Amino acid sequence: MPSQTFLNLPTEKQQKITLALLHEFANYPLAQAQVSRIVKEAQIARGAFYKYFTDLNDAYLYLYKVAMQEIHTNLKHAPKDSNSPAALSKFYLSEIKNFLNESQTSSYADFIKMHLLENEISLRSLQAPEPETDAIKWSIAVLSHQTIRDCYRYPAQQEVILARVSPIIQAILQQA
């Protein structure tokens, strides 16, 4: 995550650097990203970049966190009072659709696509493992994320992909 030095920068300068990160990481896989392009666009010294971020991975994870916070703003938590697999399945499908809509219409759309299709797997070793959760919630989370990834990979088939997920979630929930 960014250093306190970065967090103490004026908002305009933070935004300029964040925009340069977005342009770099939306257009190049992390393995091909370059600090030189970021510092050129942000109009900062290379040394300043390393005062703000440990490395490219650190800068990437910062941008990912910013994007997820913005995109997840309108997402809801599962209703606690519903025991109906059909109602919960409908809720999860609605949230998958909401995430797709929010992410695909946001300024982060190309970044999220690059993340899902190119960078996500290589970053797993850098992120802390998920806290322990029950098998049902884990299964639904994995299925939901794969569905989102598939919708980004095959946008012309999004409706078909979404149509198949609801009955699968319902079947998982019926096993609970």
Image: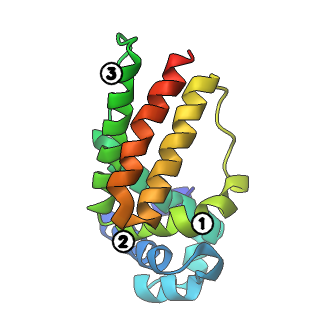
Check disc 1 and report the residue beneath it: 119
How far apart marks 2 and 1 lie (CA) works out to 26 Å
Res. 53 image quadrant:
bottom right
Residue 79 position, x and y percent, is 35, 19
Residue 114 position, x and y percent, is 49, 70
Of the 4 image quadrants, the one containing the N terminus is: bottom right
Residue 75 relative to residue 31: left or right: left
Q: Are marks 2 and 1 in contact (CB under 8 Å)?
A: no
Residue 6 relative to residue 10: left or right: right
Residue 168 position, x and y percent, is 48, 34
Nearest to the observer: residue 128 or residue 144: 144
* For discs 2 and 1, the disc positioned in front in the rendered view: 1
Check disc 3 and report the residue beneath it: 87
How far apart marks 2 and 3 lie (CA) works out to 46 Å
Check disc 2 and report the residue beneath it: 13
Q: Which mark is residue 15?
A: none
Residue 152 seen from this side = yes
Residue 70 relative to residue 115: left or right: left
Q: Residue at x 33, y 21 (%)?
A: 87
